[in-house]
Image: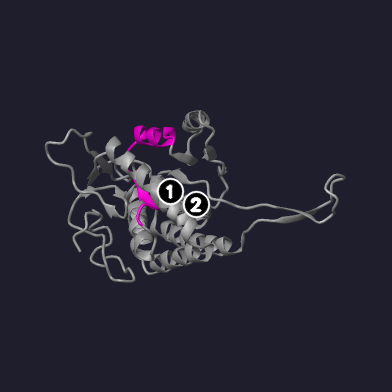
Amino acid sequence: DDRPGAIKDIGGEKGLKFQNQSRIMTKSKLLRPFINGKYTSAPAASANIAPKHILLNPTNASPHKYQYHPTPSSQIQQALDCAKTAQQSWASSTSPSHRASILRNAADIMAQNVELLSEMETFDTGRVIRETKYDIEEGIECLNYYAGVGNSLGGNSYNLPGSSSGGGTNNLAYTLREPLGVSVGIGAWNYPLQSALWKSAPSLVFGNSMIFKPSEYTPSTALWLAQCYHEAGLPEGIFQVVLGDKKVGEELVQSNVVAKVSFTGSLDTGKKVYEMASKDMKNVTMELGGKSPLIVFDDADLDNAVAGA
């Protein structure tokens, strides 16, 4: 398959064991956004686009052969339009159990590709294989967990006392859970795939669409996830991935199409995202800063401390 996914060589010749045996691995070295169910075409040489962002090897800061152009405003707007249109049908014409089944399909696909995905995460982040393999296994659990939640979470009903003017006591109030609409996820560099899953799985199973912007330093597995969801049965436009730095994130957060923003990153950047989102009262979730320091004394077991870290 010659789709322009541009993640060749990361998993050697194993490819991706999708259920229909398709692949997103190509010989291209140019990573491309995933918009409306497919990877976008490579920009024309004459196009007025931003310079390429070259990924770096995190172990020695040497350039990778993989690179990408930040997603231009025209494609960001295309993704927003697709997300808005697709979400309306996704919410109204699919049941929570159907959405849950798609998450389970995606979990099954991931389970067939643990080794490949752990290599891709290590390739991007520099973290050791034993850690990234654990991350992938946790990601599979995340999908299955939210598939279960999607099948079980509903509204509530309450019996209310009758009013003196109503003439009765059998009044009933109920709550109805409804999707927010288009959501935006902005991920962190250190847990790229987990970050994408933590944000997308609950959003999708409850009838929202999501545009995800991975860290500009570690975009590979988010692109893999977009194709994985598509292969699992997710309709076009429901999960899309755009590439770039804070300018791309700002354009997404400030869009009036977006109802929800989920951000993982630093405290300073989180404050800026919160300020932008507050201008039209978007729903916001923040995961900010590191909160798990380790203190190692002279008499510590260093091997154990490193393994724990």
Does 183 sit left or right of 224 as displayed?
right
Mark sitting on residue 203: 2
- CA–CA distance between discs 2 and 1? 7 Å
Q: Quadrant of the N terminus?
A: bottom left
Camera-side residue: 231 or 65? 231
Q: Residues within 10 Å of mark 2 (few under 14, many from 20)?
A: many
Residue name at image x 65 percent, y 56 percent: 155
Q: Are marks 2 and 1 in contact (CB under 8 Å)?
A: yes
Mark sitting on residue 220: none
The three-letter amino acid code for the residue at tag 2 is Ser
Highlighted magenta segment, given as a residue range: 236-256
Q: Earlier in the sequence, mark 2 or mark 1?
A: 2
For disc 1, the marked residue is: 210
Residue 126 visible in rendering: no
Q: How many marks?
A: 2
At which x and y percent is residue 179? 53, 50
